[in-house]
Amino acid sequence: MAKEKIYFIVGSQDLYGEECLKQVAADTREMVDFLNSKIGEVVDIELLPTVETSEGCIKDMRIVENDDDCVGVITWMHTFSPAKMWIKGLQILSKPLLHLHTQANEKLPYDSIDMDFMNLNQAAHGDREYGFIVSRLDIPHQVVAGYYKHDDVVAKIRRFAEVAKAIAFSKKLKVAAFGNNMRQVAVTDGDRVETQIQYGWETNYYAIGDLVKIINEVTDAEVDAKMEEYTSKYTMKTSNIEAVREQAKYEVGFDKFLEKNEIGAFTDTFQDLYGLKQLPGIAAQNLMGRGIGFGPEGDYKIAAFSAVLMKMAENREGSTGFIEDYTYDLTQGEELELASHMLEVPVSFAATKPEIDVLPLGIGGKEDPARLIFDGVTGDAIQVTLVDMGDHFRIICADIEMVKQPKPMPKLPVARIMYRHKPNFAIGTAAWCYAGGAHHSVVSTALTKEDIANFARFTGTELIIIDENTTEADLLKFSGRKY
Ligand code: MN
């Protein structure tokens, strides 16, 4: 059973009599049991007392709000439920809300339907009354419509639960910034106060020396254990074992620092690595593979955002992680992008068994760092980023197709992924540029634009989608700051 829970609240009223309310409770219990059997490994769904009055609604919503394990709430109007009785309760609610527009019955019983049946099963009536008040209160919410046992409806509820869990995670996320933003870089910077207000991220500065102190106290035995993990998972291509042990020491040190300070994401910058012999390579790659958010060049937003999206994807197949747009193959009609980073490409993208190698790094002025080298996974994916536009944040989400690299790149000393833009290179990348999309992003084969749209909706973030339906005409709309 999952630790996180979602409460389920059903709406009715006291006009229909005891029998009707008993049936409402029984039907809803059956619905909750069914949903738990389908998505119980993602989230535990618990039924609250039926809302029949304004006071009852306030009581239920207080339970939702006060329970730290609760990440969201599902509501459904089995009968008519006059929506003024929902106003004060909904005003308390700050957690993600799913309005499930469904019925206890799939088919209409044409032969036996009478007024009792109509009064008992009137989501078409009650859910519209309720939908009006949620909309009028301007509460961010998701509506899922359809019979609750249908696979597509269950899948949407499951996705809602995953997004709600990610938002709860986001609200608690602490980010360590080792050093500041890389000098002169714009898109990695941003308003840390505002990201805390909107997404919950507590981003705080730490001296790299605080980390170096812990790294220097890492024992040989701890490094041995980490090296055993590396050699069991990866192919050792280098004979410079000492350089790899240095990275193993970094990872153990990072782990201790992150655990001690309850931190789920971090940034570093190669302009401030005092006390470290190498830029963290394998250390960062392996940490990202375990769901720790990372942002290079002081990019606290992508560090936090990648951690949140990895959390969202934790129960799904596929790869999710940080990446940087790097270089293109512009062969006409067959354009591809090669995305990578100096070192820090998450190991979760590996399609081939990663190789550990120690090679020079063009910048940074440090010793040659050990890194994992591999080719990337393939398949449908999204590329998503978050930028600070000064008076609001903007999420840009593009559908992409991850592809196998057409030829080997024997001299490229870093891990890499390759992808094709949608609807094509000219429109897809131009739209990204018009939208102000960063060169740091999160790529995921596990998440979809629907998940990102839900995250944007629940966090009140502007969203720009670039996909198969984006056209030249859409680009013409990107004419100014507000669109
Ligand atoms: Mn970068």
Image (cartoon, rainbow, N blue to C red):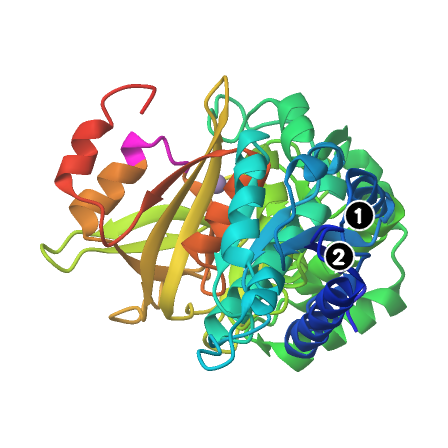
> Which of marks 1 and 2 precedes in the sequence?
2
Q: Is residue 359 above or below residue 388?
A: below
Answer few, some or many: residues within 10 Å of disc 2's Cα (few below 14, many 20 plus, some between 14 and 19): many
Q: Is residue 322 visible?
A: no
- Quadrant of image for the N terminus: bottom right
Magenta stretch holds residue 359: no
Measured from the top left, where is residue 252 in percent x and y? 80, 58
Measured from the top left, where is residue 171 in percent x and y? 72, 40
Say which of 447 and 378 sits in front: 447
Q: Are marks 2 and 1 in contact (CB under 8 Å)?
A: yes
- Tell whether 380 sits left or right of 243: left
Q: Residue at x 49, y 78 (%)?
A: 109
Q: Which residue in the structure is indicated by mark 1?
A: 64
- The three-letter code of the residue at mark 2 reads Tyr
Say which of 54 and 289 sits in front: 54
Q: Is residue 444 above or below residue 173?
A: below
- The three-letter code of the residue at mark 1 reads Val
Q: Which mark is residue 7?
A: 2
Say which of 132 and 15 sits in front: 15
Q: Residue at x 81, y 72 (%)?
A: 225
Q: Is residue 152 visible?
A: yes
Measured from the top left, where is residue 25 in percent x and y? 76, 66
Q: Which residues are magenta?
A: 433-438
Quadrant of res 85: top right
- Quadrant of image for the C terminus: top left
Say which of 375 and 437 sits in front: 437
Label 1: which secondary element: helix
